[in-house]
C-alpha cells in the first residue's frame, strides 16, 4: 500500500512495517501503521470496531457502489422523508448477512472479485456475516444523506449504501467515505503523511509512536511473578492463580486473550486462559522498557 511505503521511506525503517485495515480507493481517514513486533497484533487491531462517516447519493446506482464507477440514474428521491430513510437504515443494524460488492478484494477460486469485474465477469457471491453496531443520520440534503456508521471487520459501507438505495427503491451509492476510528486509533491522534514528513525533518516523528499495548487496553491485564515471566518468555503455560493480578478487569471465563506483564511492568505477552486454569502464551514480545499501561499490583 502507498501509505505504508511512504511511511517506511519517511521514517527510514528497516524493520517490518504493516497496516491494519485496508481503505477503499475513494476513502480517506485513519489507517493504523504498525512497526516491528507490533505487526504481530495486526489481526487484533483490525478486529476492533471501526467508525465511518459516509455520504450516500440516493436516486442512482453505480457498478462499483461508489462515485468511481459507471453511474445510472434510477429515480428522483426527493419524496423520501427522514422517517423513510431511518426505517430502512434500521434493518442494517446488528448481525446481518451482507453481499460484498463485485468490485472488492475478496477472492473467489483464487481470483480477486475486482479483477473478475474489470474483465467483464459477474459471478455469484455468497453473503458474509458482518456486525453493525450503530448507524446515525448526520444530515439529509437530498439526494445526499450523510451517516455515521460503527461496524466490525469485513463490513462494506458501499454495500450498505447500495442496499439502502435498493430498500428505498431509488438506488444509492457512496460519494464520500472517511474512517474516523479503528479500535483505539482515531482522527484526534492521527497524523497526515505530510505532517509526518515535516516531523521527520525536525527529528520528532518518533513522538507519534504509541507503545505496543496502547491499542490493547480493552483486554484484561495481569502481572506475573519472576518465575511466571521466565516461563512465558519460553512459551510455557503459567497458572492463573497468581498473586499479582488486577481483579477489576479479569474474567477467567472470557474468550479474550490477556495482556501479561512481568514484575517490572514490561509488556511480556498475549496469553489465552484455558479451562484447566492455565494461561497459554500466544504471542511473546521482547520489549526493553516498562509500559505505562501495566496494571497496578493488587494490594493485600
Image (tube, rainbow, N blue to C red):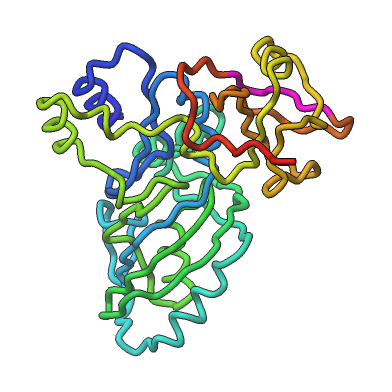
Q: Residue furthest front?
A: 300
**Residue in the foreground of this view, choosing between 54 and 217:** 217
Q: Position of residue 276 (x, y in %)?
A: 89, 30
Q: Is residue 279 magenta?
A: yes
Q: Judge left or right: residue 44 versus residue 251.
A: left
Q: Judge left or right: residue 224 versus residue 138.
A: right
Quadrant occupied by the N terminus: top left
Q: Is residue 66 magenta?
A: no
The structure residue drawn at horizontal position 76% and vertical position 27%, both measured from the top left corner, is 279
Q: Is residue 231 above or below residue 34?
A: above
Q: Residue furthest right?
A: 276
Quadrant occupied by the C terminus: top right
Q: Judge left or right: residue 126 versus residue 57.
A: right
Q: Position of residue 100 (x, y in %)?
A: 50, 50
Q: Give the magenta part as a residue range.
A: 278-284
Q: Is residue 81 above or below residue 278?
A: below
Amino acid at each position: 500500500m502507498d501509505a505504508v511505503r511512504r511511511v517506511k521511506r519517511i521514517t527510514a525503517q528497516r524493520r517490518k512495517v504493516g497496516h491494519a485495515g485496508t481503505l477503499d480507493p475513494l476513502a480517506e481517514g485513519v489507517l493504523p501503521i504498525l512497526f516491528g513486533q507490533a505487526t504481530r497484533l495486526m489481526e487484533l487491531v483490525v478486529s476492533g470496531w471501526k467508525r465511518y462517516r459516509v455520504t450516500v447519493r440516493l436516486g442512482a446506482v453505480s457498478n462499483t457502489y461508489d462515485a468511481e464507477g459507471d453511474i445510472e440514474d434510477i429515480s428522483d428521491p426527493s419524496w423520501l422523508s427522514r422517517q423513510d430513510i431511518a426505517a430502512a437504515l434500521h434493518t442494517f443494524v446488528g448481525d446481518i448477512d451482507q453481499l460484498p460488492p463485485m468490485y472488492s478484494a475478496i477472492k473467489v477460486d483464487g481470483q480477486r472479485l475486482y479483477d473478475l469485474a474489470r474483465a467483464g465477469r459477474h459471478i455469484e457471491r455468497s453473503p458474509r456475516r458482518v456486525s453493525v453496531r450503530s448507524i446515525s443520520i448526520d444530515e439529509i440534503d437530498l439526494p445526499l444523506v450523510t451517516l455515521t456508521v460503527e461496524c466490525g471487520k469485513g463490513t462494506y459501507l458501499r454495500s450498505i449504501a447500495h442496499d439502502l438505495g435498493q430498500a428505498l427503491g431509488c438506488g444509492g451509492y457512496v460519494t464520500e467515505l472517511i474512517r474516523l476510528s479503528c479500535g483505539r486509533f482515531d482522527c484526534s491522534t492521527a497524523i497526515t503523511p505530510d505532517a509526518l514528513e515535516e516531523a521527520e525533518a525536525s527529528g520528532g516523528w518518533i513522538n507519534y509512536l504509541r507503545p505496543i499495548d496502547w491499542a490493547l487496553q480493552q483486554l484484561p491485564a495481569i502481572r506475573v511473578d519472576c518465575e511466571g515471566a521466565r516461563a512465558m518468555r519460553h512459551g510455557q503455560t503459567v497458572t492463573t492463580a497468581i498473586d499479582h493480578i488486577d481483579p477489576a478487569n479479569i474474567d477467567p471465563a472470557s474468550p479474550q486473550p490477556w495482556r501479561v506483564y512481568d514484575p517490572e511492568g514490561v509488556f511480556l505477552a498475549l496469553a489465552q486462559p484455558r479451562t484447566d486454569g492455565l494461561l497459554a502464551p500466544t504471542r511473546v514480545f521482547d520489549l526493553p522498557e516498562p509500559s505505562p499501561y501495566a496494571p497496578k499490583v493488587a494490594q493485600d
